[in-house]
Image (cartoon, helix red, strand yellow):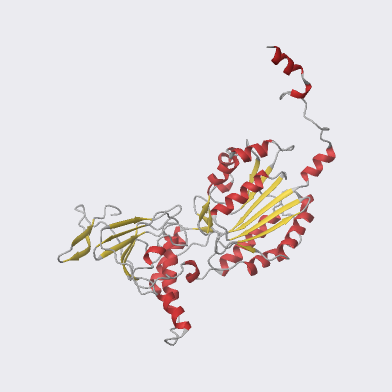
């Protein structure tokens, strides 16, 4: 058409084949672009001073693995600036702290004990930022086999990183950069975070990526001081902060047959109750036990069933058992005092009945990577806590081909509840 011809002839309607506006990029521009970086350091959930020290050391090693040695002074300045700050604390998210630094050549963010949504948001911010060198460091526990980063309310997986890189906003930002962006990830070498070719290939179309690359450490000033700062700044949650006491008095009575299935992160947990009997099945993958807000209103849990020893079932249960141990160790103050009322609210938690768990009694933790959370390590913690509580775990095994049931509950005038064990035998 005539209009189409006019549009094609108009210089103001330049199409994709037209030259980009502005002067061409010079070597000086490229050097300036290469001298800009973004550091995102994350300290995951830690449950002991030893774990905190190991996490701080892991963050320090990750920072020393900075991919561009020419920027070591900028990185050092960022660390010094963050150490001079007081971390910002979220009113809505218990335990989470944040530090930030911004300069012409350097952006840096430090997350202490963040939740999963915060990690995803900050990783997206890093990926969409125009700085070419992006350095992601995680210090904390990683789940065995998967390598997922353990956080206070869940876990960040390699698949989460892949999904973020393929997010439309991120893809647009990455492809619009003048120089091909590069991402270096430093964390526990486990699962897909080992940097296998298959894992890296899934991201290489969006960004040049290296996972735990082997390179000489970049001697960055202030790294050791920054590690000490992390140890002093990160707060370890007590069992009573992790699993807060109920505010209401009295106990919940469940009369009708009920089944509660909890959102347990990357695991499972459920609570089953009939008139006069209840059973808790598994504990979920988060230390902030998903079942706690229900069971803290009960006077007793008649039975606990751990279907297996795994990183998806034991963390929540171990937190519950650790709280029971902490309750026992609290000294009882004088009656009628404010301290007594505080003590009374803390120790008001359900009694534990029979505990079914197929972990071998002589389980011992292996001396592997201290930053990898293993089922064996968690099983050891479970058995140790049960021992401190004078609770002997009962094994659940099928002993013959007839699969005789195990009677969980039997009450005259109410009924009987049998459990058939199909596996293991």
Question: Looking at the image, which residue is at 57% across and 45% down?
Answer: 161
Q: Residue furthest top?
A: 1
Q: Please give left or right for residue 241 compared with residue 125 in the image.
A: left
Q: Nearer the viewer, residue 47 or 345?
A: 345
Q: Residue furthest bottom?
A: 334
| Quadrant of residue 316 within the rendered picture | bottom left
Quadrant containing the C terminus in the rendered view:
bottom left
Question: Looking at the image, which residue is at 70% across and 54% down?
Answer: 108
Query: Residue 412 placed where, x, y %?
Result: 15, 66
**Residue 224 shows up from this direction:** no
**Residue 32 shows up from this direction:** yes
Q: Please give left or right for residue 357 compared with residue 89 in the image.
A: left
> Is residue 126 depicted above or below 352 in this figure?
above
Q: Please give left or right for residue 154 compared with residue 275 in the image.
A: right
Query: Residue 257 placed where, x, y %?
Result: 26, 58
Q: Residue furthest left?
A: 413
Quadrant containing the N terminus in the rendered view:
top right
Q: Nearer the viewer, residue 377 or 420?
A: 420
Query: Residue 192 placed where, x, y %?
Result: 54, 46
Marker count (numbered) = 0
Q: Please give left or right for residue 103 compared with residue 150 in the image.
A: right
Query: Residue 314 placed where, x, y %?
Result: 42, 60
> Is residue 146 depicted above or below 331 in this figure?
above
């Amino acid at each position: 058409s005539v209009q189409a011809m006019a549009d094609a002839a108009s210089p103001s309607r330049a199409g994709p084949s037209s030259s980009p506006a502005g002067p061409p990029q010079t070597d000086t521009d490229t050097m300036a672009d290469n001298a800009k970086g973004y550091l995102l350091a994350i300290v995951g959930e830690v449950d002991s001073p030893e774990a905190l020290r190991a996490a701080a050391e892991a963050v320090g090693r990750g920072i020393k693995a900075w991919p561009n040695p020419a920027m070591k002074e900028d990185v050092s300045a960022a660390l010094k600036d963050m150490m001079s700050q007081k971390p910002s604390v979220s009113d809505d998210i218990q335990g989470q702290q944040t530090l930030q630094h911004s300069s012409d050549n350097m952006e840096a963010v430090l997350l202490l004990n963040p939740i999963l949504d915060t990690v995803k948001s900050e990783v997206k911010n890093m990926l969409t930022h125009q700085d070419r060198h992006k350095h992601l460091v995680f210090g904390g526990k990683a789940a065995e086999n998967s390598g997922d980063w353990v956080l206070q309310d869940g876990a960040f997986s390699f698949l989460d990183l892949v999904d973020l890189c393929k997010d439309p906003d991120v893809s647009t930002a990455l492809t619009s950069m003048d120089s091909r962006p590069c991402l270096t990830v430093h964390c526990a070498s486990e699962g897909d975070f080992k940097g296998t070719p298959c894992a890296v290939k899934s991201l290489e179309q969006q960004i040049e990526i290296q996972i735990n690359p082997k390179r000489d450490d970049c001697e960055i000033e202030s790294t050791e001081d920054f590690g000490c700062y992390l140890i002093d700044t990160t707060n370890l949650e007590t069992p009573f902060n992790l699993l807060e006491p109920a505010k209401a008095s009295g106990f919940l009575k469940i009369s009708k047959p009920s089944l509660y299935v909890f959102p347990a992160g990357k695991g499972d947990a459920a609570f089953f109750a009939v008139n006069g009997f209840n059973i808790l099945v598994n504990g979920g993958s988060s230390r902030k036990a998903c079942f706690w807000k229900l069971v803290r209103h009960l006077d007793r849990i008649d039975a606990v069933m751990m279907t297996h020893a795994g990183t998806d079932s034991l963390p929540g249960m171990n937190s519950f058992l650790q709280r029971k141990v902490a309750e026992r160790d609290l000294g009882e103050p004088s009656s009628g005092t404010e301290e007594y009322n505080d003590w009374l609210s803390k120790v008001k938690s359900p009694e534990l009945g029979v505990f079914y768990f197929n972990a071998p009694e002589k389980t011992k933790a292996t001396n592997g990577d201290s930053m990898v959370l293993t089922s064996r390590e968690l099983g050891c913690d479970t058995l140790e806590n049960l021992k401190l509580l004078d609770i002997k775990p009962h094994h659940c095994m099928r002993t013959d081909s007839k699969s005789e049931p195990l009677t969980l509950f039997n009450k005259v005038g109410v009924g009987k509840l049998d459990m058939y064990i199909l596996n293991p035998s």
